[in-house]
Amino acid sequence: MSSADILLTAFTRGRQAVDLYVSDSARRGHTWGEESATERLLMNAWPEVPYVQFNRPQEKAIGADWLWWFVDLTGECFGIIIQAKKMKQTKTGLTVDFKYPNNTGQQMNDLFATAHEFNLPAAYMLYCGDMEYRRDSNSWCPACSGEDSCCRRCERAGTLLLPALAADQMRSQTPSIAAMDAFDAGFPLEDAVDRSVSTKPLRDLNIRSLDLPLHEFLTAPQHGPREIAKMMFEVVSKMRSGQFSAVAPERPRVSDEDVFIFSATPRDTGHFRTAYYPHILNGLRRRLPEYVEPVMNGAPPPTDLSDRLAGMVVVQI
């Protein structure tokens, strides 16, 4: 078995463990939680997917955001700040609450604040349960509309990655509509490491103003961390294409070219809370930050990590 197949098997094992936890809890009338789902995902994907859970001081109000790094053999990497979010089962189908808590949306605001602190994209890990758990919502599948019992997307849809910029646009919707749109827009976590799954050339609204390296990134096949970044970008780019605000002819936002793979990106915000190019693509780095290797080898995490994050995952592609 190749290293890619081994990694995909680990992600599948983790997703299946979460599906079982969510579905068993629902059948028994138990409340299940996002943090427990994440623990099951990581424990069952280990050791192929190494992770470190930080000791969180009780006196500090710390969220459940995890820092994920996807890194290839060249050292290039893509980082994401990920918040777990449950899909609740109701009599009419699944719902999701992006306005938590109490219709304030503070959880989402905190997620974006943490992502801004690390200059990384924000995303949700949506836990949707197995096909029986979402039996009244399987028609939402963008691949088969619930009509194919062997659909790979349906099988993997228990754990979906959704860019937070996309979720932010769903925050004003009812929980049932938000769940439907999130289920449609998100992509299975397993797809991120499955070499047989790849994005198509993208025709983003800003495509004509891009420099050659960024243009090629969007229109040519990618692999590893770049492909995962492109999957994240594709979700938001498609949403941007449906927004009616004009593309502003502004100078690109410039970042440190020694750190970021794409150091100059369009500042177009569309209807998003921030410019979507730098928000997502600043997650693509030439190398891992210096703190990653020591922390993964058992060193205490720096306080700027442990004060804001629940832990860190490093996926070697």
Image (spheres, rainbow, N blue to C red):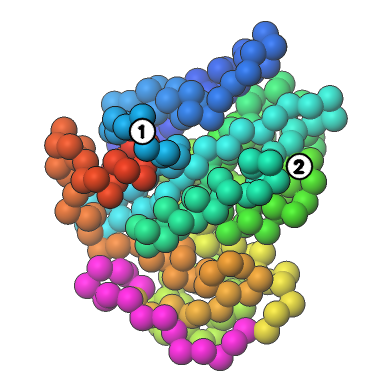
**Residue 81 in the image: above or below residue 50:** below
Residue type, numbered disc 1:
Glu
Residue type, numbered disc 2:
Pro
Dot label at residue 233: none
Q: Where is residue 243 in the image (x, y as percent from the top left)?
A: 72, 72
Q: Which residue is drawn at 42% across and 81% down?
A: 253
Query: Which of the 4 quarters of the picture holds residue 312?
Result: top left
Q: Mark 1 points at which residue?
A: 59
Q: Which of 221 and 239 is in front in this view?
A: 239
Q: Residue at x 64, y 24 (%)?
A: 130
Q: Which of 137 and 203 is in front in this view?
A: 137
Q: Quadrant of the C terminus?
A: top left
Q: Position of residue 136 (x, y in %)?
A: 81, 29
Q: Which residue sits furthest right?
A: 92
Query: Which of the 4 quarters of the picture holds residue 57?
Result: top left
Secondary structure character of the magenta stretch overall: loop
Q: Position of residue 68 (x, y in %)?
A: 37, 45
The tally of labels here is: 2
Q: Give the range drawn in magenta.
A: 247-262
**Residue 74 in the image: above or below residue 306:** below
Is residue 256 found inside the magenta-colored segment of the image?
Answer: yes
Instruction: Identify the mark nearer the N-term, 2 or 1.
Output: 1
Helix, strand or loop status at disc 1: loop
| Mark 2 Cα-neighbour bin, 10 Å: few <14, some 14–19, many ≥20 | some
Looking at the image, can residue 229 be seen? no
- Judged left or right of residue 32, residue 307 is left
Q: Which of 24 and 150 is in front in this view?
A: 24
Q: Mark 2 points at which residue?
A: 175
Query: How far is disc 2 from disc 1 in space, using C-alphas?
Result: 32 Å
| Mark 1 Cα-neighbour bin, 10 Å: few <14, some 14–19, many ≥20 | few
